[in-house]
Image (cartoon, rainbow, N blue to C red):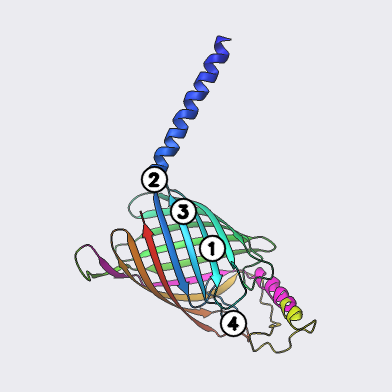
Amino acid sequence: MKLAISIVFTCLIFSHLQARQINDSLASASYTFAALYNSNINYYGQVTDEKLPYVLLNATVRLPFGLYFSASSYKFLNYGSGISGTDLGIGYDYNFNEKISSGLAYTRSFYPTNSPLLQASLTNNLNGSLSYHWPWFKSALDVDYAFGDEQDIFLTLSNSKDVSLGNLFDDKDLISIEPSIELVAGTRNYYETYVRAKNQRGQDKGNGKPPTNPGNSGGVTEYIPSKSFAMLTYNAKLPLSYSRSSYLIELSYQLSLLVPSDEAIKRAQSFFGLAFYYQF
């Protein structure tokens, strides 16, 4: 009997200490809220032949030991009604030293029926990242395993340089740019599913008659790319940021060169974005 009481008492103490640690972590956590606009949604620099500008809201809670939770919801400005998609994520970041950092994250996406997104068949994403800070720039390698109705893998190698442009109003603010170059390779199993889904949307819209002109936004391309691992896009990014102690405003431009590019999609794509981040 005394042994049972001792075990129960020990468990209660352990539960109390664990709850206290969690509460302490939440009390010292950082919270970030973001609102973003982009001129077109893209998937590793790839786009559909339908332009889809959108707005996105995000909330992230980051604990002191590197664990974080995030939730995002976005809305297309010219397609459908209601929410266009929702993402829930969990991740962990770890710094080995001042030069080497790593991360592991999982994201679960929820899309409405007949979503026009390229990645609509890939509702899960597992990401691993490793970055190294050289004296003059930063290199990063990301590996993404996306799965759902299809399975795909993507490899992204990027090089970026954070450049301070000085202060605007006082010594408490900062203007900076961080130009970067990305090389993205991967598979495109998701694309065949996207073509079938778009074909079905076209039939539903046309009362059972499939679209015949792949050169416009209502058409469906017949091109199904190779499922082998290959180069997908070359991306150049130029974000301009204004930051103070608790918030950041960012204006961004991205140029993507698609490889390969089917006949219905331009090889070069441009994206313009505006974002606001607030942290406390």
Q: Which one is in front in this view, the residue at disc 2 or the one at disc 3?
A: 2
Please tell me how crowded label 2 is: few (under 14), some (14-19), or many (20+) other residues with Cα within 10 Å.
Answer: some
Determine which of the numbered discs, if any, sits on residue 73 in the image. Answer: 1
Disc 2 or 3, which lies upstream in sequence? 2
Q: Would residue 90 be seen by someone viewing this image from the given angle? A: yes
- Residue at 38%, 42% in the rendered image: 27
Residue 70: x, y in percent? 49, 55
Badge 4 amino acid: Ser
Helix, strand or loop at label 1? It is strand
252 is within the stretch colored magenta: no
User: Disc 4 versus disc 1: distance between alpha carbons?
Assistant: 29 Å
Point out the image quarter for the N terminus. top right
Residue 264: x, y in percent? 63, 85
- Residue at mark 2: 64
- Residue at mark 4: 261
Badge 3 amino acid: Gly
Disc 4 or 3, which lies upstream in sequence? 3
Q: Please say if the residues under marks 3 and 1 sit with CB atoms less than 8 Å apart.
A: no
